Image (tube, rainbow, N blue to C red):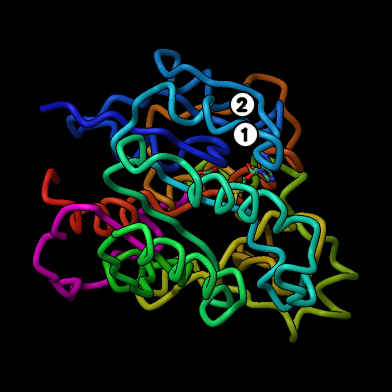
């Protein structure tokens, strides 16, 4: 039977991409970023989307779609080194705090049967984590937590993430990720770009001579090449935001479309025409590994 889902902090739709082939109907995709929503609508035109500040959303807005699964990808900055790990003192934690408050008082019969959350590894052990686990357990959810990186699923890209699955019914028996051999990075690259078609992707020579030794530069044909995690700051921050590629005598950034491919969105995925490179990098770097989400969803007996 079709499972009804609500996608909170929907971004460009990593969850929607993960369930595209499954018997899931997305009843609502909620986010506050107009650019993310524009991209979402282009790729998932049948899903109802809404621009909503989840720090202010009402319980009714969440309950009305009668979704059996809520997927949450709240902002990770409160739990990241780069965001100074201010946890609940970070204003960006306000939305998850508000959702927890709503979850604590929604009548039992209106609670979603399943709930899942994705965040950075730094979320583990945070105050937000502690409160969420306590709240969900108190409301009768059975919980499962795991760390998963796409490299464990054969994808040559690091993006370790924490996943929480919670259910009011028994979770499916736990299965460790079956080890898969790493796919070559070259499979994810755009051959056109390797020939230098897009000048904007190339790093200036003076940057390479000054900082090259500190940058994670990959050889495109090396079968062991694995990217570091791409963040929303890729293209703005030189370091700790993602990998680079050697391209003959020059070095280039990955294109947003290559990052999207590494996340395993469908080849049909498109950004809205005219969206800037910076914006596309920002949205791709904020998204999630579609393959990892599918793996995590297996905790629910319907999948
Ligand atoms: C880590 S990203 C999640 C991205 C998404 N899973 C995807 O596949 O693209 C966090 C998202 O939360 C949104 N967001 C942050 N604070 C929000 C708030 N208070 N209300 C609604 N959306 C918010 C951001 O715009 C961003 O798209």
Position of residue 74 measured from the top left corner of the image (x, y, whole percent) = 58, 52
Write the start and end of the magenta stretch as one range.
164-189
- Tell me if I can see residue 195 in this picture: no
Position of residue 262 measured from the top left corner of the image (x, y, whole percent) = 43, 53
Q: Is 58 displayed left or right of 68 in the figure?
A: right
Query: Please, is residue 149 above or below residue 298 in the view?
Result: below
Residue at the image point whose x is 29% and y is 59% from the top: 140
Which disc, if any, is residue 31? 1
Q: Is 164 displayed left or right of 233 in the figure?
A: left
Position of residue 248 measured from the top left corner of the image (x, y, whole percent) = 62, 64
Q: Is residue 183 magenta?
A: yes
Q: Nearer the viewer, residue 100 or 247?
A: 100
Q: Nearer the viewer, residue 218 or 164?
A: 164
- Tell me if I can see residue 283 in this picture: yes
Which disc, if any, is residue 266? none
The image quadrant that residue 3 belongs to is top left
Earlier sequence position, callout 1 versus callout 2 = 1
Which disc, if any, is residue 37? 2
Label 1 SS: strand
Asked if the residues shown at circle 1 and circle 2 are in contact, with their CB atoms under 8 angstroms apart, the answer is: yes
Query: Please, is residue 32 above or below residue 179 in the view?
Result: above
Task: State whether label 2 is within 8 Å of ligand 1.
Answer: no
Label 2 SS: helix
Task: State whether label 1 is within 8 Å of ligand 1.
Answer: yes
């Amino acid at each position: 039977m079709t499972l009804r889902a609500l996608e909170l902090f929907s971004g460009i739709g990593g969850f929607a991409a993960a369930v595209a082939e499954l018997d899931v109907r997305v009843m609502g995709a909620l986010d506050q970023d107009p650019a993310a929503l524009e991209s979402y609508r282009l790729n998932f035109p049948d899903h109802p989307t809404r621009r909503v500040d989840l720090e202010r959303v009402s319980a009714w807005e969440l309950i009305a779609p009668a979704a059996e699964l809520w997927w949450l990808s709240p902002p990770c900055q409160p739990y990241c080194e780069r965001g100074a790990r201010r946890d609940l003192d970070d204003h960006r934690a306000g939305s998850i705090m508000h959702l927890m408050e709503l979850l604590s008082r929604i009548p039992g019969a209106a609670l979603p049967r399943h709930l899942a959350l994705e965040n950075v590894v730094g979320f583990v052990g945070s105050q937000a984590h502690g409160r969420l686990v306590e709240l969900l357990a108190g409301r009768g959810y059975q919980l499962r937590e795991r760390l998963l990186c796409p490299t464990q699923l054969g994808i040559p890209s690091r993006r370790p993430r924490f996943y929480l699955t919670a259910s009011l019914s028994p979770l499916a028996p736990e299965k460790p990720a079956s080890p898969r051999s790493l796919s070559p990075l070259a499979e994810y690259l755009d051959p056109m770009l390797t020939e230098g078609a897009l000048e904007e992707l190339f790093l200036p020579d003076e940057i390479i001579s000054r900082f090259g030794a500190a940058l994670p530069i990959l050889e495109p044909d090396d079968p062991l090449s694995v990217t570091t995690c791409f963040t929303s700051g890729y293209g703005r921050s030189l370091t700790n935001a993602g990998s680079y590629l050697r391209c003959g005598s020059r070095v280039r950034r990955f294109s947003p479309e290559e990052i999207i491919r590494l996340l395993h969105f469908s080849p049909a995925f498109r950004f809205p025409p005219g969206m800037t490179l910076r914006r596309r990098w920002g949205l791709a770097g904020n998204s999630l590994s579609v393959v990892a989400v599918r793996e995590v969803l297996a905790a629910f007996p319907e999948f």
